[in-house]
Image (cartoon, rainbow, N blue to C red):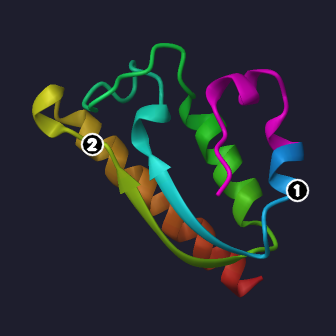
Amino acid sequence: ARLIFPEDIRRGRWKKMLSGVKRSVYVSVDIDVLDIGIMPAVTNPEPGGLSWHEFSDILAALLRRRTFLAGDLVELCPPAGPAYAAITAARALVRLIALAEKSRLG
């Protein structure tokens, strides 16, 4: 397993970290990695977390030229925030599935 933290993103280390990831991947998205401004309904909100574009770029880079085995999304807590947070989580899953399918099709 490889963990990428927000500071890895800000310091530009994430691309190098992805180079060591195996050919087949299981992607677990801990949704509280997103900034509290776009994902407040989580168990551990992260001020200074990732933007939507950073998150999406990392997923795209991770799934490029790799086989997606399966994935999940964890830490959404709808009672902890506004309804749009559940929509953001759903969009994160849709993005993951779309990128996995794009990777599969080549």
The residue that appears at 88% across and 56% down in the rendered structure is 19
Q: Which element is circle 2 on?
A: loop
Position of residue 99 in the picture relative to residue 72 (left or right): right
Q: Quadrant of residue 68?
A: bottom right
Whole-angstrom CA distance, mark 2 to mark 1, is 29 Å
Q: Which residue lies under the disc numbered 2?
A: 76
Position above or below: 94 against 39:
below
The residue that appears at 61% across and 66% down in the rendered structure is 99
The residue that appears at 33% across and 53% down in the rendered structure is 90
| Residue 19: mark in rendering | 1
User: In the image, what residue type sits under mark 2?
Assistant: Leu
In this rendered view, identify the residue nearer to me: 76 or 3: 3
In percent of width and height, residue 23 lies at 79, 76
Q: Residues within 10 Å of mark 1 (few under 14, many from 20)?
A: few
Is residue 10 on the magenta stretch? yes
Is residue 5 on the magenta stretch? yes
Q: Which element is circle 1 on?
A: helix
In this rendered view, identify the residue nearer to me: 102 or 61: 61
Which stretch is magenta?
Answer: 1-15
User: In the image, what residue type sits under mark 1?
Assistant: Ser
